[in-house]
Structures are given as structure tokens and as C-alpha cells.
Amino acid sequence: MSSPSHGANTPRTYPSRPQAVYFYGTCLVDMFVPEAGMDAITLLEREGIRVIFPDNQTCCGQPAFTSGFPDEARRVVEAQLDLFPGNHPIVVPSGSCAGMIRWHWEKVCAGDPALKARAEAISARTYELAEFLLHVLGFNRKDEGPATTVTLHTSCSARREMGTHLVGRELLARLGNVTLAHHDHESECCGFGGTFSLKHPDVSTAMVSDKVASLKATGASQLVTADCGCMLNITQRAAREDQDAGRACASLPGEHLATFLLRRTGGSPCGDQK
Amino acid sequence: MSSPAQQSAGKPVAFVSAQALRARMHDAVNDPHLRQSFRGAMDFLMAKRAAQFPDQGELDSLRSLSESIRQYSLSKLPDLLEQLEANLTRNGVQVHWAETPEEANAIMLGIAQRHAARLIVKGKSMVSEEIEFNHAMEAAGVGALESDMGEYIVQLAGEKPSHIIMPAIHQTKQQIAKLFAEHIPGVDYTDNVDALIQIGRRVLREKFEVADIGLSGVNFAVAETGTLCLVENEGNGRMCTTVPKVHIAITGIEKVVEKLEHVAPLFSILTRSATGQAVSTYFNMISGPRRGEDKDGPEEVHLVLLDNGRSQAYADEQLRKTLQCIRCGACMNHCPVYTRIGGHAYGTTYPGPIGKIISPHMMGLEQTHLLPTASSLCGACGEVCPVKIPIPELLIRLRGEANSAPHANPAMVGQGAAYDPKISLLWKLWARLYARPATYRAFTWLATRFRALTPTQQSGWTAARTPLKPASRRLRDMVKDRR
């Protein structure tokens, strides 16, 4: 498989509905937003899919890879290659981690043909959660929630690496009582970029502040996104603005698409049960 | 009128070191005027480009074709350069090779001195900016006057271009009005754009008549025919290359293509990507000096081919892709970082995403290693690049070149410039932690159980956000509990 040429719409063929999938939760979800992962698992199981959670999973290696430490990335990737012995699809609740697995694992493993071949075999059956729900499972459950307006942020990796920017929209469009409010500069990055947000806080802050302003200007009641990195970046910037302005209520609450879909279609998101 | 060249002499426009990048970015993002003007200008350019490509399929195939042409040309670069030289020479063009900016300037100064030239009138050329041509000439007492309106404004202001296609995009019409009133004798303040253009045009017309040499860049050099192609909108490029007795063209060695038919797709995708024009107002094909029966044209034509770090990029299969660039500027128009800091903050001749990947070859990583880090890797640049340069991939490569411990036979000058044993050790520890599931589980167990102890100062993150705090239970705990 060759790496994505950004902007080209690489059409992907999807498998038929499998009996089981591997769930690759990602390190960010594991430690910071576990509800999103749990709700994604519930969604999949409710569609009749057996979900296998390999307990030895850690991280896709993206932080080291994008920071320019390819050897360290390879060490971590190598430790993930044994997680998926069966031939089931691998579902990832993040466009950026899915993009890393799908396009960059083979690059970090390029020095070792055997390793590279194993990475490629995994890349080929790795799907971002939203595309899996739409294209493989044909997710189409009745919206049981009250009328609401939400706004959607699609991560740059989902948009440009996984080519799934229309998938989130389509899933939301299938919910009868949900109106999607588009924001200005929708295709523009939220300014997270992993270590970029730590290394260049001035520019990252400028970008996320603009994103928060655009999202708020829609008047939507909440943000929905399928990437937790972007979600934490956007909502915690908004929370800081609330704090600085002395607002007690979150002016831009956000949640993962999985949580939102589950609640709207009659499920109980695990965060709601507390 | 005193020429802007004389006014800025002794006040070099050379930029502060790229190491001051952080400070410049800080100032730029906190300048509301700059933010607003770049946002507006980039929105305008993005919309213009989008309108040129209503058909995604046509865009995809034109990008693929353009990428292939550029890659094919680069694959034969040494041969094509020889062929170009032979055919240009046959056409009567004198070809010069320059490895460094100093050599290029010396060659051109030599030509100027041979003709006892006092004034060189210039068409737009980023390579001439790259070598600080104007200052080199001024230092030797030869005037160099920009005739592209944007470049003229930037020269009056004693600045460098802030965009490779729209050099004065950071200037408002009021600022330009003030510049004109201050610097051009007999001109009163007016911020009427048409009036300003007429004033500039009048001044420049006079200069074309007296200039001894015309300088231009080159967009495509055709090896098979020995033709220099020049894309422009103002007609000043045609004036520079036809009115003065001597025409000097300067370009980077990567600009060569094999056949004339290779030019058409590149020309089409260049103007559509750059300014959203279906075609530029002027397209010049220069194939030599005036011949016996010709009524006009220069008596002497020179081409200076500049390396300046390009062979370093060329030598590496991956880094070579940098040289596919046709200098359209679409990457900067679509870059969320460029949009927020403008071109000057980069401190390099070429700003924006392309600047981040080409400047390290020209200036070395010692000065430029921070540039490739100033990207969220959003991929917008790679998505719009007309010749499909994988800019994000190259940024990551350059980060790696800068971070790695200095070693023998590096691919780049300045390899290891950002090497920090402490940072490297941190990443090694990170890799150990994440490559060992048991250690990772122990770490995340501790981090979630003792989350109350999470530091609330988290480097750049908490500069503008509430602190990150681990959840009380990990996803794996939740999964286990439910089974």
C-alpha cells in the first residue's frame, strides 16, 4: 500500500459485516476519555458485533513519529503488531490514530521487511470508528432524542488521511431530530497537533481560540467530534475562556461521536450512569 | 526622486536569525491588524483557487500529471541541465553556474560592471530575494529597482516579501499611500488604489527607459528548446526582459523541464493554484537575444543557474520531493499557521510550509531547525500542493534530522542541530514505557488512581487551556468490569 496523497480521494473498499472486531482504544482514550471508548464498544456490540479488546495495547506511536523520533516510534509500534492475531477488522475511535496505523506504521517499520509486511497487513484492515459504523455496519438507528442543534469538528487526520470527513456528517444526518450547524473555516485545524500544542503555544492558542469562536458562533448546544485529541484541545480551551470570564456553565461542551450516537439512539452512555 | 535602493542602502533587510522565531510568532499572533489582514487575504485566495477547480476529478488528474512531470524532470536533472545549457548557448544565451548566493551575485555584478550599469530594473524573482541581490548590487554602487508593484512597495518600505506571490500582502492601502507620499517626490497622500497604481506605473515607466539591465526570474526552463518561460500579470516582466540592452535571468537549478509540452499543464495548475486565475495576463517565452531582423529585444541575454543547497535536497530520494515545487504559494494560502503569523515571522526568504522544507537546505538546520516544528501537521498544504509534495512527511523527516545525534555522512548540513541528550532520553523512556504493556498498565494505573496529584502546570497546554487530568478509571478497567 502506498502512502496517502493528501487531497486525493482514495476510495476504500469496505468488508462485509464481520462477526468480531478488535477494538484499539488509543492511549488518549484509555487514560483521559475512557467513556468514549466504552460507548464505542457498546455501539458496536449493540449492532451484534463481538468486540475483542487486546489487553496489551498501549499507543500507536504517533507522538514519537510526528516529533521526529522514528526509532522510538518503531519500538512502540513493534509492540502492537502481536495484538491482532485473527483476521478481524480493527476499529479505532480516532481518525488520527487510525491514520497513523493505516499509513505510517509501514513507514516506521520500513527498515525491516518482515516487520513492514506485518504492519501492512494490519493497516489494510484498520478502520476509523465512524467509517466502520457507516460503511460496514450501515448504522441507521432511530433518533430518540429531543430536537437539538450540534456542531461537528472533523480532525485533520480523519479528513485528509482517512478521507472520512463526510462520514460524521452522514451519521448525524441520519438522526432525525439533530440539526448540524456548520461553522466557518470548518476544514481548518483546531491547533492541537500533538506536541505542537506544547512546543508552540502561541500559534496553537491562536488556532484553537479561533476554532472555539467559530464553533460557538453557530449557536449549537454542543460539539461532537470523533477525535479526543481535538476534543480535549477545543473544550479545555473553551473551559479556560469560561473560567477567565467567570462563567459557571460550559459554553462549549463537547463529546465523542460514539457517546452522542449512543445517547440519541436509546443507549445509555457510561458517563451518564454516574 | 531618490531611488528606494539608495534609501535602504546601509539598512540591510536581512532578517534576524530564525532562532528568534518564537519571539516573532508571539508578536505576530498578538497583532490584531496582522491577524485580520492575513485571514482576509488568505480567505480570498483560497476562494479564488477553489473556484478554479470545480471538478475534483480534473484537479486530481492534473495534480498527478504535474507531479509526474516534475518528478520525471528531476529524475533526469543533470542531463536536462546540460541539454538546457547547450540549447541556450546555441540560441545565444550565456549560461552561468552559481553554487552560492555570493557566486551568483558576483557573476551578475561582473556583467553589470562590464556594461558600466548604474541601474538594474527587476521583474519579480524570489531567487533574487534568496541571494539578497538588491543589497549586493547596492553595496557595489549599482541600483536595483523592483518593478513588480508589490515588490516595489516592499522595497520602498525596506522590507522583504511576506508572500512569494503577493509580496506586499501585509501592507494596507493606507500604509502604501503613506509610503508613496513619503518616498516619491511630488506625490500627495492618496489611498485610492487606482491612483496609487498609476503613480507607481508612471515612476517605473521612466526607469524602464533608463535602466541598463533588466533582471527576471524563470518559471520553467525548457531543456529541449532552450526556452525560458516567465509567468506574470503586470507586463513589467516583459518590459524587464525586452527593453534594457541586457537581460539577466536567474533561477534555481530545479526549474528545468524537458519538453515544451511539459510546460502547459504546469502553467495551468500554477496560475490556478496561485491566484485563482485560469491563465496569467502575460506568459513570456524567451529564447535568446535580439536577432538581426528583430525590431526590439535585449542585445545580450544571460541565465544564472543557482544551486544554494538544492543539490543537497536532490541527493536524498525523499528530500528531493522538495524540489518539485513550482512556487505557487497555495501551501501558504491554506496554512493555518501562516494565516496567523504572516510571512515575515518565518525570517526566511520563503515563508509558509514550502519555506519550512526548503529553507533548511539553503540555510542549514542550525538556523532553521525550529521551522519544521511550527506545524500541527494538519496536511492542508499537502492537500492543495499542485505537484503533490508530501509536505507533512518532509516536515517530520526534517524534525528527525534535527533531533538525531550528530553522525558521520549526514544528509543535511546542520543535522543534529536540535539534538538534546535529555530530550532524546525522555523519548527513549517513553518508548520503553509504551513498548512494554505491563509497565504501561502500571503507569496508567498509578496516573488514574493518583490523578489528584496531576500537575496543574502543563507546559504550553495550560498556557491557554484548563489542565488535563486522567480519568478515575481507564478504558481497560471499564472493559474488564463489564465482562
Image: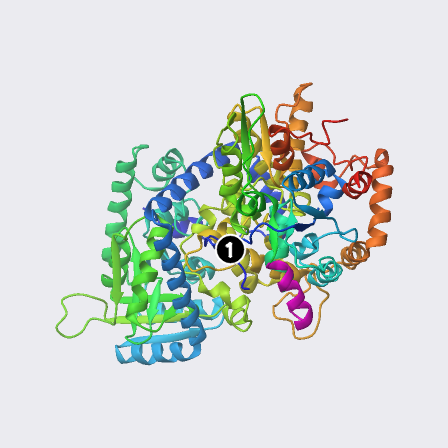
> With respect to residue B237, does A193 lie above or below?
above
Q: Residue at x 53, y 68 (%)?
A: B313
> Residue B123: where, in percent of width, then height?
33, 57
Name the chief secondary structure element in magenta: helix
Q: Give the camera-side residue of A17 and B431.
A: A17
**Amino acid at pointer 1:** Thr
Question: On the picture, is B178 further left or further right than B342?
Answer: left
Instruction: Identify the chain of the residue marked 1, using the numbered disc in the image.
Output: A
Q: Position of residue B283 (x, y in %)?
A: 26, 59
Can the viewer see residue A130 in this picture?
yes
Q: Which residue is mark 1?
A: A13
Q: Is residue A125 left or right of residue B68?
A: right
Name the residue rendered at 67%, 57% in the picture.
A65
Give the percent coordinates (x, y) of residue B340: 53, 40
Q: Is residue A41 magenta?
A: no
Whether residue B116 is visible: no
Q: Residue at x 79, y 56 (%)?
A: B422
Q: Which residues are magenta?
A: A107-124
Query: Is residue A121 covered in magenta?
Result: yes
Name the residue rendered at 56%, 71% in the picture. Answer: B316
* Left or right side of B452 for A118: left
Q: Which image quarter is the C terminus of chain B in? A: top right
Say whether residue A91 is left or right of residue B206.
right
| Quarter where residue B465 is shown | top right
